[in-house]
Image: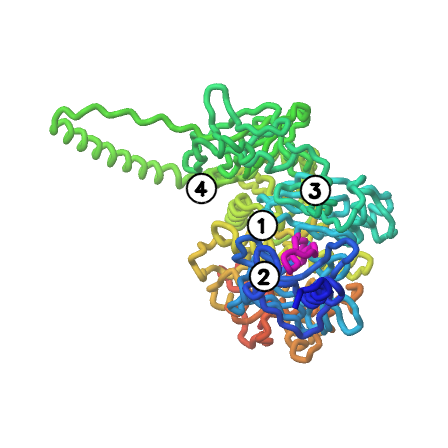
Amino acid sequence: MAFTPSLALVALLLCFPFFVNPQLYNYPTASAPVLWTNSPSQNNTFYYGETSPLLLRLNVTHGLSFATGFHCFDPCKSFFLSIYIVQTDYYMNSYYYLSQVIWSANRAHPVSENATLELTSKDGLILRDSDGSLVWSTNVMNRSVAGINITEVGNLVLFDINNSTIWQSFDHPTDCLVMGQTLAGGMRIIASSSNTDLAEGQFYLTLHVDGLYGFVVSDPPLMYYHNNLIYTKYDYGRLNRTGDKFIFIKFMDGNLTMFSTLSNTDMGIIIPEMPLAKSIQYIRLESDGHLRLYDYDEYSRWKMVADLLDMDECDYPTVCGHYGICNNGQCTCPAKTLENYFKPIDNQQAELGCNAVNNITCHDVNNHHLLNLPIVSYFNTIDNVAFDTIDEETCKKACLGDCKCKAALFQSTNGRCLTLPEVFSLHIQPDDQFTAYIKVQVAPSPPSTPPPHHSSKVGLGAILGFTFGALLFMLTLVIFYIVCFRRREEEQDEDIIDQLPGMPTRFTLEELRAATENFFKILGKGGFGTVFEGRWGDRRIAVKRLDNVGHGNKDFLAEVETIGSIHHINLVRMIGFCADKLNRLLVYEYMCNGSLDQWIYCRDERVSLDWPTRIKIITDIAKGLRYLHEDCTQKIVHFDIKPENILLDEKFNAKVSDFGLAKLIDKDISRVMTKMRGTPGYLAPEWLTAMVTEKVDVYSFGVVVMEILCGRRNLDDSQTEENHHLIKLLEEKSKTNGLSDLIDNNLGDVELYKKEIVNVMELAMWCLQWDSIRRPSMLIVVKVLEGAMEVETSLDYNFVSSIPMIVNIPGVLDQSTPFSASVLSGPR
């Protein structure tokens, strides 16, 4: 029988029902429970072997649709659970997708084939790798999920039986924003490492009360972009007091605009004159720090239509790699007329940066020199807070005296100095009057060749003479030590201080006396000293004077050595110190909102912290402790975590302070024996044995979390006898499902956040486990707070033991606050 056109049409309709009825393949919603498996080998619908979408929201008008599924990049060895934009079309009896990823759940941990995604009513989404290990979850805290939906604007939403949103991807952006998406105050978009590696890269954008900020990851992070917010004086006062939650940016058609919910009106255009959308648009923070707008053009391809930060190319931190100098878009290496200290990584690709000819080594500091580069500036000169106000010679000496310093910048017009532990791209900037001093290492001169030996007798005589001379020299040293050094113990202490690596600026007593107006304004008092407010140049500082020098000398050395060698955004930065005979002082950055205890114990509802601010503070403390425990060369145990030692800046960012009791522990040592040290109410039970680990900080953190959630001290004499001990009360409430009874009454919108608060209480209880081995590490704590892991379910709810604590025996307890034996630490 002849094959007629009509039969061909029937065959076409049977093979491609999608072509006839697109709604047949529109599956944007799924109900719980459901289990999906990543099986790319069973489906070749997409380029690069991607699996079919788990959810697909078709948009017939534009031909562009949003999908959720397992996505990979050629050669497709690992997969990301992603939201992506797809183009629907037909080719060779199938349809293909040109996908563009806009969000990923597991960007730091791609999964393999046969990984699973499960939607449950209790936990929401749970992503597991093929071996069953937990990779990511939505952590919805038993809020009864009814289903999942991918919306018309690309938002992945979990909803309950009332169709109310429980969780949405818009609240957890990765490196992109799509139209209709908002970036709220305190949230970040973090660039990917590359176009095919979705792991977090070097750049992030974040929103604060005074505008949009861009940072490159360093230690500490360095600002490369700031766009001020336009607002009224009245709004500024309220925003400054209440924090970031009233500010958000919304990406709409043709505009990226900042709003305030105080007035629900536009408070200032951040980036104006963006092109109007022809179809779907998205904004991506790229791996090079650019914020670019993409649109789908008439040739069916994604096209970059705007670079939104409106910066000069040379102002980006990695435009010329490390050590490269940018001048009108051209990259070169630092050079000197007679000698080159740097060479290009690749002569054909100057933008890759430069390598030092001689690597800088800390054991050869005598050969460190500074290469003078006039009219050379840096990208973060916009960050006034990062600079110190000192003279040029002091600036140069500060860098030469710190092995970790790789360069110093000095601005001659106003005496601003910045030392850099890492050198990103530099650029020529004649108008700023900056000079860059790049640290280089000069190769030492080769040793001279000794003359040839003339006879064995001469050689033997030389050996005997050298041996006798060496013995005589050693004997002289011993006598010199016995006669002189033992009589100069105080001077020896100061020599030790000067020799500590990476030391901050050393002040004279007269300088700090003038800076504090003769120690006039007291900010606070502690067990070891008094803190005064001061001003050094244009910068406000906090000066801690150790009052008890006899006991504080050791603690002074510990604090200077510890803080002088570490830098983290959640650790208070030490600016300098003073060691003048018996006077010991420490100089810190000023934290305008004081210590945490002033906020969480306050009974005034008008200044009570809201829940978003409290959970941010808890997360900041956890990140600071994680850095101390995990990321330093040696493990640093703080030993005195309490609200008085948590300081808050103007944006209520929390920073751990006061390292007077800190101890450095080698990472290959599991436990150490030390004197009991700390503050009543925060001491872990293993102090009974004096054999401790970093888990004592985890325990103290658990106590602090409970105090933040409950708005009271652990040991509170103002309470009734049965309520005196918060951790004892927590134990009782945990066994009667009454945890919500403990929530601070001054915390607004308790019903809205109750489940989330109780979940954080359960995390605190995990940290308060009597057996230190059962407590999580601070790394795990951070992951739980960020939603990447869940709280351990099999907890021991007996936090309080009948075993008595060690009483205050002289020589056993180092304490930061005096106390009596009757009010010792928590569990008794």
From the image, tell me which residue sits under label 4.
Answer: 489
Looking at the image, tell me whether mark 4 or mark 3 is earlier in sequence order.
Answer: 3
Residue 788, picture quadrant: bottom right
Pointer 3: residues within 10 angstroms few (<14), some, or many (20+)?
A: some
Q: Which of 213 and 720 is in front in this view?
A: 213
Residue drawn at x 68%, y 80% as measured from the top left: 736
Query: In terms of sequence position, does the residue under pointer 2 or pointer 4 come before the other?
Result: 2
Tag of residue 304: 3
Q: Where is residue 218 in the image (x, y as percent from the top left)?
A: 58, 43
Please state which of residues 733 and 814 is positioned toward the viewer in this rendering.
733
Label 2: which secondary element: loop
Tell me the residue that label 1 is attached to. Answer: 196
For residue 92: magenta?
A: yes
Q: In this view, does 797 lie above or below 193?
A: below
Identify which amino acid the numbered label 3 is placed on. Answer: Met
Q: Distance between the residues labelled 4 and 3?
A: 67 Å
Q: Relative to 620, is 374 above or below? A: above
Position of the N terminus by quadrant: bottom right
